[in-house]
Structure formats: C-alpha cells, structure tokens
Amino acid sequence: MSAPTGPLGPLRGAGAVNLRDLGGVRTSDGRRVRTGRLLRCDYPAFAEGAAGADVVARSGLRTVVDLRLEEEIGVECPPWTALGVDHRQVSLVSGRGDSWHAGYARYLVHRPRQVVEAVRLLMELPGPALFHCAAGKDRTGVVAALLLKALDVPDEQVTADYVRTAEVLPTIMARLLEHDYYQRILARTTLADQTPTEQNIGELLAHLAAAGGAERWLLEHGLPAETLAAFRRAMLE
C-alpha cells in the first residue's frame, strides 16, 4: 500500500491513532468526495513534543475544531497558537445521559446549535482542517456523519467510516485512562460499551432520515444554504 499523501502523510505514525481523511468515498450519484481538506481524529497527540512543530508544518494543517469540553482542554491540549494553527472550540455534549449507549441523536435533540456551529465551521474554514474530541468516536462521529450525509454519501459508507474506530479503540482507551479526569468519566463503562457498532450510528442515521435528511435538518437548524452549496462545490469532484 502506498504512503498517504497530503496532510495525512506527515501525521500518520506521529501520535495520530484514530486519524483518517473524510474524503475518498463516493456519493449516491457516484461523485467522489475530495481528500486533503477534512480530517477526523482522536486527541491529536502528534502535535505535542519537540517534533510536533515539524509534523504540523509538513502536514499543512491550518485549522483545528476541538469538540471537547473546557475541562478536557485543561487536561491536555497542543500549543496550537505556537504551532501556527487556528484552534476553534465548539463543545459538544449529548444533553442527557451518556452518548455511548446508542445516544447520538441526543446531540441533535438537545444541542442542535452547537452541532450546527461545528458543522458550519468545518464547511467554511479553509483546509486542511482537523476536527476531534477525545477518542475521535462519539462527538467526532456525529459531526463526521452530518458532513458526509450533507454530501449525500450513502449510509453504508458513513457506517463503514464510523466503525473503523473499533480497530484502534483499545489503544485509545488505554491512553485516556492514564488521566484521572477520564478515569472518573469512564469508571462505569467498559470497552464493549465504548466499541462503535452499526447500531450506534444507525440510530443517528435513522433520526436524520425521519427529520427529512441531513440537509433539511441542518438548514432548519440554522446552517446557511450558501454555506452548504459552497461546501458541496468544494468537496465533490
């Protein structure tokens, strides 16, 4: 297999465990989603340490949209400003209960404004841009699904992208549990609970379908139509 090109090349193997490009998939009408503009990731540890500046510079990364809470950012956060990267924060919470028991629709029901803000930023900001939470699974998965569905990517492709996190989840969980903060949060859950399944993302996709689709949901909750149109022009080959 050839080495990744674009921003993925320098970032792979530099502390990015759950990193992938949102592009490369096909839409329902056969068009290809462009690569090199939007990346999804777990906590971007590649930007830490002495080598972080070189890795980020070689990747061309320009913007990071951080979906974590203030408390999480206080636990760990790369020095984005010093690295020349625009760091934007849009904290996502599911609203009630936890998000790992097939509760992804809770983000849309209880925090639609924050969800749309994260999507809007990623649609409007110049790439390469990266969005992440702690594991790159729940909050990141919701935003990734909305971006892909806004481009009319079929459900099976969205699901395939989502469940890929299962391959690296044990490594992610081990890293998170090194921090007291995440030990407290994850104390009542298990690796099996956290493992992404088709059912998890299927619940979100079903909610979107019942709402008339991702495009309708986003527009009805404040996404400018011109932002969506420009995003499609930029992302579809």
Image (cartoon, helix red, strand yellow):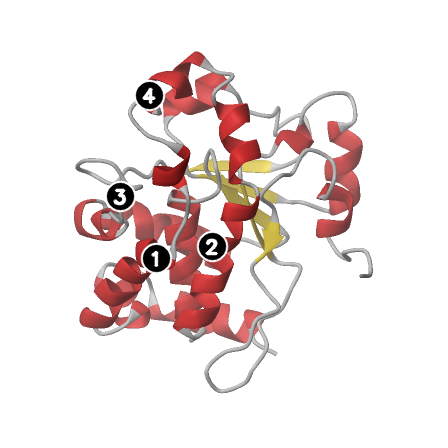
Q: Residue at x 33, y 21 (%)?
A: 187
The residues tagged by marks 3 and 1 sit, at their Cα atoms, a distance apart of: 11 Å
**Residue 101 badge:** 3
Q: What residue is shown with label 4?
A: 187
Q: Circle 4 sits in a helix, a strand or a loop, which is it?
A: loop
Q: Are marks 1 and 4 in contact (CB under 8 Å)?
A: no
Q: Residue at x 58, y 49 (%)?
A: 129
Dot 4, crowdedness within 10 Å: few (<14), some or many (≥20)? few
The residues tagged by marks 1 and 4 sit, at their Cα atoms, a distance apart of: 23 Å
Counting from the top left corner in percent of width and height, residue 54 is at 80, 33
The tag earlier along the polypeptide, 1 or 4, is 4
Identity, as a three-letter code, of the amino acid under mark 3: His
Q: Are marks 1 and 2 in contact (CB under 8 Å)?
A: yes
From the viewer's perspective, tell me whether residue 133 is left or right of residue 93.
right
The tag earlier along the polypeptide, 2 or 3, is 3
**Residue 201 badge:** 1
Q: Is residue 74 above or below residue 36?
A: above
Identity, as a three-letter code, of the amino acid under mark 4: Ala
Image quadrant assignment for residue 215: bottom left
Residue 228 visible in the current orientation: no
- Quadrant the C terminus occupies: bottom right
Q: Are marks 2 and 4 in contact (CB under 8 Å)?
A: no
Q: Circle 1 sits in a helix, a strand or a loop, which is it?
A: helix
Residue 229 visible in the current orientation: yes
Q: Circle 2 sits in a helix, a strand or a loop, which is it?
A: helix
Identity, as a three-letter code, of the amino acid under mark 1: Ile
From the viewer's perspective, tell me whether residue 32 is left or right of residue 50.
left
- Quadrant the N terminus occupies: bottom right
